[in-house]
Amino acid sequence: MNASTRFKLSPVVMPEQDPAERVHNVREVPLGFTPEMALHEAQRCLHCTNQPCVEGCPVGVRIPEFIQAIESGDYLAGIGIIKQTNLLPAVCGRVCPQEEQCQKNCTVGKAHRDVGQAVQIGQLERFLADWERENHAAVIPQIPFASGRRVAVIGSGPAGLTVAGDLIKLGHAVTVFEALHMPGGVLGYGIPEFRLPKEIVYAEVAYLTRLGVDFQYNMVIGKSLGVDEVRQSYDAVFIGSGAGLPNFLGIPGESLLGVYSANEYLTRANLMHAYNENSDTPILRGKSVEVLGGGNVAMDSARTALRLGALRAIVLYRRSEEEMPARKEEYHHAVQEGVEFHFLQNPVKILGNREGWVTGLTVQKMQLGEPDASGRRRPLPIAGQTSNVPADVVVVAIGNNPNPLIPAALPSLQMNRHGGIVTDENTMETSVPGVFAGGDIVLGAATVILAMGQGRKAARAIHALLTRTTETAKG
Amino acid sequence: MNTIRKREELGRNVVRYVVDAPLVATHRKPGQFVIIRVTDHGERIPLTIADANPEMGTISLIVQSVGKTTREMTMLRPGNAIHDIVGPLGRPTHIQRFGTVLCVGGGIGIAPLYPIAKGMKEARNRVITILGARTHDLLILEDDMRNVSDELIVTTDDGSYGTKGLVTDAIRFLVNGGNHIDQAIVIGPPLMMKFTSLLTKELGIPTMASLNPIMIDGTGMCGGCRVTVGGEIKFACVDGPEFDAHEVDWDSMIRRLGTYCTAEQVAADRYDHECHVGLDAGESR
């Protein structure tokens, strides 16, 4: 097929659960490509010689090659190509912001001046990963030899899983310490089931277990085991403890009953299965849920509220639609499902009744001024324009800071002013020799793929450290 | 899985378990807690560590059946297992030689108070203990507390044992009797902690309280355990569980404990049990 024929092919429309139906279940929204759809979408790739898409990928997945494999019908080869650089394709295919990475650079999209016309790389990645999982086709790679070196990974989120996968394949023994009773970090507690089925996360973890990674749950490093104890027992340590420390607004009323951090709301719903009425873990099923914030977590919270039976789920955002940081796709899905968006509204007070239950919010109407440090136009209050809106549940989704437990337990770690661990940008090594860090504990709340990218860098540096010291010991 | 080694009924609906948790046993300090899940589909609840035996690799947990989960737990027998135990969590109690330390415990709050009183005694403080219970058969750990106290007073609301009255009456009695107290620590049902705190503030006695809000992860991630202390939001799991009792916004804390009262009622009804959260949530710890 020549390039102009390929270029004329229109994007395959991803089949999705009907909005009216899906708000009553927690099953995944996009249903995935059929082999025919995947073939058609793969044929849209122009196989550019300069491969701009690969440059846009934080872990450098060899995109045109795996797409070529789909076109040839060799799915096993395709997934093999992806897995050389990306251990979690089923996850990344679903939650990566491809429109800002690989797909943003795609020549097809650029030629159409519409990123929406780019080859749907993420969906193709998901297709291969799902094919592999559903057909139990995962190949256990030959692990060359046991190095005799031991690595401790703290946290089983995307960064930790990447480090564990890379190092076990290089012959090092890896133990992953997880504070919760289930693996995945934010993939498990934060991202809702309807966006990332937990079965997928657990399948990825099961694969790592088959490779020999030892997962230890209910282990809070710095508490159950001191950081120094871990350092003494392992040749290297990777900290991937994430951005689990929710921000609150600091406005009156945040202690009222019915006010949640998004982390708590989503953890109850996801990790603890409170979306199931018979779950032992309760959750307040508000009729009118106001979500404060404009990121993906706000979208997840509002959509979760609908699935918990809310009659109205409203996102309050202090800037306009333009500045909203949520992915377009998430925003679009939320709108389809009936989430209401109130832009240029800044909550200034949460209102409650005499018994302490939330009854609503006082919101200040805003307008956009000059751009601020983030480059976005700064929201400014319009004097005298406040109003009250009703709510029986309020979810605060305005971001997270790095979790403080490990830094508190290892005071010699150098920290930045946002509470993140300072690392060398090439090796991810911290100020403490032999201790590496990556993901949200370094970045603050960022993305799955950036965390994985840092995990990959750290794994490479840890491997270099372990093999160097091995050789020194031998010599 | 954490196997139960020993089970002992301490009082009405109150059970002490000795359970395998080797790392918790060697790392815990007085004032810290664990989060448990009884079954693989259970909710996560915090329980204070009442004691530990590092050599045996066991910890003691004391639980009162008040809701579905605690009810389910008290059904467990030696040889059964608690599905998950994570900890020790929270900051340990600040133990030093203060002089005279007053330990005030109510209900099942006496369980976490015991290792603290013991620690205070080992730090060569004079330890005066006041234990309060609604009625005699709800009083737990009297002998254990007596062993680590220089003086022990028991009050019961109904006068069925010790002195009839509240722990606050006993505090007044002590102070009026000329006892100087350098530091107080109070653990019990929230209302008892509130009123003890109001009194010791009036009497000028520095007071710590160990709070027992609703928690999920216990690592600072969910923020569900937030309490207002000195006008600021604190997370009890990582900043506490102990705080300056005089700075705690007790009314807000007590209200938040009742968040799931209705849901818990529904769940506990299956066990034919009533919801005590509003008044006695301290008793789940």
Image (cartoon, coloured by chain):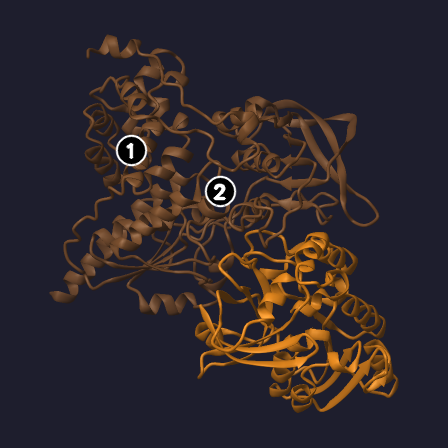
Chain colours: A brown, B orange
Q: Marks 2 and 1: CB-CB under 8 Å?
A: no
Q: Secondary structure at mark 2?
A: loop
Q: Residue at x 42, y 31 (%)?
A: A97
Counting residues from the N terminus, which is met first, the one under dot 2 or under dot 1? Answer: 1
The quarter in which the N terminus of chain A is drawn is top left
Horizontal side of A259 relative to B166 (left or right) equals left
Q: Nearer the viewer, residue A177 or A311?
A: A311
Q: Secondary structure at mark 1?
A: helix
Q: Residue at x 63, y 48 (%)?
A: A283
Residue A203 x, y percent position in the rendering: 35, 47
- Counting the numbered discs, the total is 2
User: Furthest-right residue in view?
Assistant: B176
Q: Which residue is mark 1?
A: A128
Residue A376 can be seen in this image: no
Q: Nearer the viewer, residue A260 or A181?
A: A181
Q: CA distance from mark 2 to mark 1?
A: 28 Å
Horizontal side of B144 relative to B134 (left or right) equals left
The quarter in which the C terminus of chain A is drawn is bottom left
Which circle, 2 or 1, is nearer the viewer?
1
